[in-house]
Image (spheres, rainbow, N blue to C red):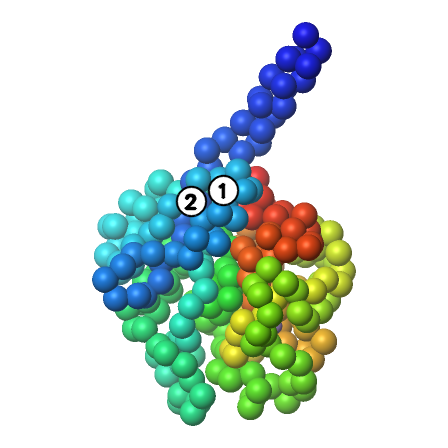
């Protein structure tokens, strides 16, 4: 009898805290597809949410309709952002693939989501899009542009493995979720936030000064990380990283 009561209580609590929250995933720009990596899908599921992939569009009414359905948004990783169009810089020789349709979709989607008060988590390209959408700039190529560059940000190790340390500001959403001031994260990027967008602050850095997380000062539900927590939730420190996704459901 006691066991049954405990079970009922546990189910009720789990249902109440994370009741069917729908988390939209921005899709990638592969030709002929509207897809997102399964790692994002699984991380949202693991945190108790319902993931849905949002196909690319710049149609205002379609984006508004989608935002009426989702409870939170993850801006996923991917290609480089057009520097000339979005932060008025000539393209660096090492600039990677740029996909104009995805840039336009991502920028519109994130601005509208924030305006509507929807929680947004930016991951990798997603945090870069977040910064640029609200007036910040990027390093187009860390190795040649970051003066203090000195550690590997494009790891060859598996994604679930943290390879470089970040130091997290104790007064941040990221610290609240991860619960550690120093932790090893994975790293798959050659670009990073340079000038932080007005209204945002830096909440984590790697040891060579590269910005690894930012958050909105006025809205703690809008934040982003340069690393990939969707992989780290399968690694050694998984219990520290799952909170990043659970935060979307709070
Ligand atoms: Mn890194």
Residue 52 screen position, x and y as percent: 38, 46
Residue 153 screen position, x and y as percent: 59, 76
Label 2 to label 1: alpha-carbon separation:
7 Å
Disc 2 C-beta below 8 A from ligand 1? no
Which labelled disc corresponds to residue 222? none
Disc 1 C-beta below 8 A from ligand 1? no
Q: How crowded is mark 1: few (under 14 residues within 10 Å), some or many (20 or more)?
A: some
Q: Name the residue under label 1.
A: 45
> Disc 2 or 1, which lies upstream in sequence?
1
Vertical side of 237 occupied by 206: above or below: below
Please indicate, yes or no, whether residue 208 appears anywhere in the rendered image: yes
Query: Nearest the camera: 145 or 27?
Result: 27
Which labelled disc corresponds to residue 51? 2
Vertical side of 132 occupied by 23: above or below: above
Q: Do the residues labelled 2 and 1 touch (CB within 8 Å)?
A: yes
Residue 17 screen position, x and y as percent: 57, 31
Vertical side of 144 occupied by 184: above or below: above
SS class, disc 1: helix
Residue 91 screen position, x and y as percent: 40, 88
**Left or right of residue 220, residue 115 in this image:** left
Q: Residue at x 37, y 78 (%)?
A: 97
Q: Residue at x 59, y 52 (%)?
A: 234
**Left or right of residue 222, residue 206 in this image:** right
Q: Residue at x 48, y 82 (%)?
A: 140
């Amino acid at each position: 009898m006691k066991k049954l009561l405990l079970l009922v209580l546990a189910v009720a609590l789990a249902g109440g805290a994370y009741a069917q929250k729908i988390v939209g995933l921005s899709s990638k720009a592969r030709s002929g597809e509207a897809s997102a990596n399964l790692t994002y899908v699984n991380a949202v599921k693991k945190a108790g949410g319902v993931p849905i992939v949002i196909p690319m569009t710049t149609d205002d009414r379609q984006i508004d309709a989608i935002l009426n359905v989702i409870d939170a948004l993850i801006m996923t990783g991917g290609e480089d952002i057009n520097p000339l169009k979005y932060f008025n810089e000539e393209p660096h020789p090492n600039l990677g693939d740029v996909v104009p349709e995805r840039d336009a979709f991502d920028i519109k989607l994130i601005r509208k989501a924030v305006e509507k008060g929807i929680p947004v988590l930016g991951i990798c390209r997603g945090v870069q899009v977040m910064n640029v959408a609200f007036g910040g700039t990027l390093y187009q190529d860390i190795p040649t542009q970051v003066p203090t560059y000195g550690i590997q940000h494009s790891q060859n190790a598996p994604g679930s493995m943290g390879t470089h340390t970040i130091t997290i500001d104790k007064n941040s959403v990221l610290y609240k979720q991860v619960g550690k001031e120093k932790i090893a994260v994975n790293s798959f990027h050659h670009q990073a936030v340079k000038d932080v967008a007005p209204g945002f602050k830096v909440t984590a850095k790697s040891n060579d000064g590269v910005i690894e997380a930012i958050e909105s000062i006025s809205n703690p539900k809008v934040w982003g990380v340069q690393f990939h927590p969707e992989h780290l939730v399968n690694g050694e420190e998984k219990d520290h990283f799952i909170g990043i996704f659970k935060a979307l459901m709070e």
